[in-house]
Each structure stands twice: as structure tokens, then as C-alpha cells.
Image: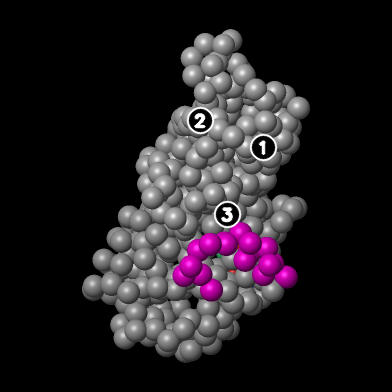
Amino acid sequence: MSFSAIVVAAGSGLRAGPGAPKTWRLLARRPVARWSVEALAAAGAREILVIVAPEMRLEAETALQGLSAVKFASGGATRAASVQAGLAALSAAPEGEIVLVHDAARPFLSASHISRLLAALDHADGAVLALPLADTLKRDDSGHLATPDREGLWRAQTPQAFNLGALRRAYAAWDFETEPTDDAQVVAGFGGRVALIPGDPLLFKLTYPEDFAMAEHLAGAARQVRTGQGFDAHRWGPGDSVWLCGVRIDHDQSLIGHSDADAGLHALTDALLGALGAGDIGEHFPPTDPQWRGASSDRFLAHAGALISERGGAILNVDVTLICERPKIRPYRDAMRARLAEILGLSADQVSVKATTTEGMGFTGRQEGLAAQAIATIELPR
Ligand code: CTP
Ligand code: MG
């Protein structure tokens, strides 16, 4: 079933207090809006139109980098105006297209919310996720406390799903004497049938400052921490320099290998691939492929880092141990940490490089070769 999405993120987030508008703040190191846009992309949205305030456009493009179905349009002064801007900017849609309208301020969108909404449209013009009211309601009538009946009342969430044609016609007919606060109101106001389907407390909207603390808590629970390890060794041969952890060191020998034989980078690349469960370096860059002959191993490591980003993950820390009698590593250690941090987009304190000898024992001790081992800890969405 083809569907597109309009994600409204053009509000100024006044109730969330000072700071950047709430949709572009970080939640577990990912911008708030990126959470739901990634879920929509993973569910196969044909196009995701993100509606942003013009002054936040660059920020938004950076926040949503690498998500291919995403397009941007400028929002209006009200939520309804922002939705209308989205409807106008959607590219020509296939016949019978469904559109999901979603508040970027509701980060915890999942595939099952989306599939339940799409399924509900078989028998309706629109579908809304909603929760029954659980608390007793109060209204302060100038000092007299009234208790309005909550029977039959629901809290509407987003996404809300509509047949695109029905939503467009309803907005075109809305007189705007009253400002609609969601889209189901507009479609129902035009006589459309909108189905209520069970909502989810996780789809709460970040509105007040304290909502962010709760979201951080939930975001932590939605992440998994994983570890991978890697090992590599190369043989010493004739030469005048050696590459280790992306740094060139003058030396009276070189390491022999198909690429630049940087065992530190290779071990670390394998550690990251291991944490992802994504095979090993040889699978991604076969030594039989001539294009990797003499290649700088920076790109192998950068590739592993990019695979983690594509999965919405992040590297927490990496630690490399080089095992050799010579050259002495200590003078180069800070340069190696800086280079690894640069390749992976980390800060230097997330990167460790250590070295040891094996006191003359084994192949490293006999100086037949150099070995490296690495460990990496990453986090991924569950
Ligand atoms: N929104 C929008 N354009 C507007 C107003 C709101 O795109 N002119 C979006 C918000 O970015 C948010 C969603 O509509 O994702 C729900 O609105 P709300 O929670 O009210 O967000 P804000 O208007 O940003 O916050 P506040 O009302 O506290 O200022
Ligand atoms: Mg608002």
C-alpha cells in the first residue's frame, strides 16, 4: 500500500521552555524529529515531507541527513497552516495514496502504529490513534470546581491517516473561523468518516520541559548496547615506514599486506562490524578485489562507522591494543587517537590506543609480525 507522510515540525515549542525548538533538540543523541522520520522511512513511506520553520531549515537538513525519502517545505503560523503547506508540496501521488500526518514532537513512533493505521483505512476516510481519558476531569469555574463527565472522551494522538484526496478536499472546504488542532477534526467536519483506533501512551507529545526527562528515560530503554572485538596480524617485510591506526611511522621495515596493512585499523573495523553482526572486513572489502590493492584502510573504518549511523546507532567507545616489540608506539599514541576519532566522528576521549610487547615470546616477540586487537561498544535502536 503506497503511503506518504507529512511530519509537522515548524512550531516554536514555546511551552517546552527556552532553548532550540523542541523538535530539533537531541533525544538520546538523535534529534527529536529524526526518531519518527526514521520510523516512517523504515516502514516504506514513498515521500516524507518535513515541514520546518524557514529559519530552522539548515538545522533540519543536518538533523535528517542520509534519509532518502525526505523532502522539506516551509511551515505556516499555525499547525493547520503547516499541514496545508505539506499538502501543497507533496509530489504527484499515485491514485488512492494514503497520507499520514504526524507531529514531529511525538518521537516514539513504531512500525506497528503505522500498519494499524493503514489497515484501518479499508473502511474509513481517516483513522486516528486515540486513548480513552483515565483521569477525572476538573474545570475551575471562577473558584467553583466542576467535574465534567469524561464518558466517551478520547485523547487524539498522531499519526493520523487519511485518503489524500479526502484530506485535501476537507482542508479546501474548512472556513478557518475556528482553528483546527488536528486533521481528523477537518475531515470529520467535512462529513468524512474517521475511525478511532487504540492509541499508545508511548506516542505522547513532548510539550513541557518535564516531558523531555521522561522521553530520555524511554529512549534509553529503546536502545541496546552491543560489543564487538577484532584481531589482525601482518608480517614484517622490507620497507621504510609503517601505517598504524591511520598514522605513518618511519621505520626500518614495513608490514606486508594487500592494502596498507594497517593492522590497527583492520582490527578496529572488524570490532565495529562484529558489534553490528555485519560480517568481517574481508566480506566488505575482498582481498581478491584489485581495487583494494594498496588502499588506505581509513575507508574500511569509515565504512563500518557509516553502517552504524545508517542503523540509527552510535559508537560509545573503542579501544585498540597494538602488539609489537618495535616501533615504539607511545610517541604516536595521541596522533593515532586523534586520527581514529576523526575517521569515526568521535571525540578523542571515546578512543583509546595502547601498546604492549610480548617480551620476546611468540611471532610478535620474534619480530616476524605485528598484531592488533580492538574492542568497540556501540548502541543501536532495539
Ligand atoms: N507545528 C507546526 N507549525 C506550527 C505549529 C506547530 O508544524 N505553526 C507542529 C509542531 O512542530 C509540533 C506539532 O505541530 O510537532 C504539534 O504542535 P505543538 O505541540 O503545539 O508544538 P509547538 O507549537 O511547537 O509548541 P507550543 O505550542 O508549545 O509553542
Ligand atoms: Mg502549538
Q: Amino acid at mark 2?
A: Arg
> Is the residue marked by circle 1 packed among few (<14), some (14-19), or many (20+) residues within 10 Å?
some
User: Is ligand 1 less than 8 Å from the beta carbon at label 2?
Assistant: no
Task: Using the numbered discs, state the Cα–Cα distance from disc 3 to disc 1 in whole angstroms.
Answer: 47 Å
Q: Which residue is mark 2?
A: 235
Q: Amino acid at mark 1?
A: Ser
* Mark 3 / mark 1, whichever is N-terminal: 3
Q: From the viewer's side, name the closer residue of 174 and 378.
A: 378
> Is the residue marked by circle 2 packed among few (<14), some (14-19), or many (20+) residues within 10 Å?
some
Q: Where is residue 355 shown, x and y percent of the image?
A: 63, 22
Q: Where is residue 305 shown, x and y percent of the image?
A: 53, 47
Bounds of the magenta segment: 55-71
The residue lying at 24 percent from left, 73 percent from top is 122
Q: Amino acid at mark 3?
A: Val
Residue furthest toward the left?
A: 123
User: Is ligand 1 less than 8 Å from the beta carbon at label 1?
Assistant: no
- The numbered disc on residue 32 is 3
Helix, strand or loop under label 1: strand
Q: Comparing marks 2 and 3, which lies closer to the viewer?
A: 2
The residue lying at 39 percent from left, 59 percent from top is 42
Q: Which residue is mark 1?
A: 241
Q: Quadrant of the N terminus?
A: bottom left
Q: From the viewer's side, name the closer residue of 283 and 149.
A: 283
